[in-house]
Amino acid sequence: MTAVRLLVVTAVRAERDAVARGLGPAAAVECGALPGREMLRIDCTGDASSERADRTAAGQGPVRHRQLVADLTAGGVGPAAAAAATDAALTAAAVRGDRYHLVVSTGIAGGFVPVADVGSVVVADRVIAADLGCETPDGFLSMDCLGFGVSEHACAPHLSAAVARVLGAVHAPVLTVSTVTGTEERAQRLRQRHGAAAEAMEGFGVAEAAAVHGVPLLELRTVSNAVGPRDRAAWRIPDALTALQDAFAVLYTVLARGAPPPYV
Ligand SMILES: O=C(O)c1cccc(C(=O)CC[C@H]2O[C@@H](n3cnc4c(=O)[nH]cnc43)[C@H](O)[C@@H]2O)c1
């Protein structure tokens, strides 16, 4: 079976480590693929995942798992940091002649309640740069309206739909913002303009780099807070990190046992 090579980009280490726990139990090793950047590598097909295959297949005969090698990086908060980290990793892989099959942008997010409640999982069908453009008296003009490029990227349609189905997740647009929404007014404006399920700060940056390299994209978010008036005390970050870990355990089975790459 073809080995799947995966690049996972989070904003912070707590998210990266939750992903590593979900993809485990194989140990993550520092692979130092890039100067000045930490990269964890997990080969999910070691002895430990053979045990997992045995558990999964108990009483059903042997189930073969595709080899899955995941590189995990915490690229920083915001679309610029995310784009830089993703491009660096994709360029290094291309130079090594060892290209990735899939890039996953992931972490916690704000949810547009009730489409995505706190504690829920969102898999993007597309990522939208929601505050990159021009504010005018007649409304917001996006990058494509201005003729400066695109303002959204599609995620791998079949894969993202399959992952959402298996996870029981919301499958809808995820916004990328440089400024976290902190008022009901802006939340309503974004809700009406895009019909999105969640907002976060990195997806579009990851997507821009992935598009340049021609690598398919997934964005998977777990909801730690409602989009709207700032209420830090209501954030459920530990729960969202646990949900992220659980979601990646499921993603592992989809990638290791579902349709092989190329992802479409
Ligand atoms: O201190 C605050 O009030 C505050 C409010 C919202 C977000 C933050 C962050 O530090 C979030 C940064 C981090 O988490 C993702 N995230 C989570 N929830 C949201 C959200 O509602 N809107 C945008 N981003 C969110 C984001 O991707 C960043 O990586 C602090």
Image: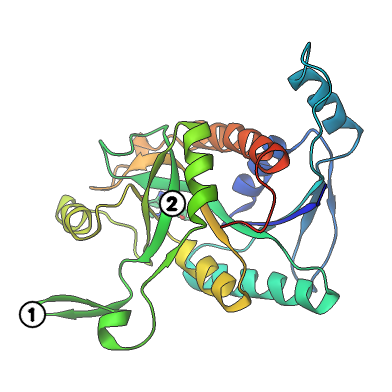
Whether ligand 1 has any atom under 8 Å from the Cβ at mark 2 is answered as no
* 139 or 261: nearer the viewer: 261
Q: Single out the residue that lies furthest toward the left.
A: 138
Q: Is residue 224 left or right of residue 113?
A: right
Q: Measuring 57% from the left and 32% from the top, which residue is drawn there? A: 242
Nearer the viewer's eye, disc 1 or disc 2?
Answer: 2
Report the residue that reaches farthest toward the right: 47
Q: Is residue 234 visible?
A: yes
1 or 2: tag closer to the N-terminus:
2
Q: Residue at x 78, y 18 (%)?
A: 55
Q: Measured along the vertical axis of the image, is residue 171 above or below residue 97?
A: above
Q: Is residue 5 left or right of residue 12?
A: right
Disc 2 residue type (three-letter): Ala
Mark 1 sits on what residue?
A: 137
Picture residue at 62% right of the left edge, 33% below the top: 250
> Label 2, on which residue?
124
Q: Position of residue 230 (x, y in %)?
A: 28, 48
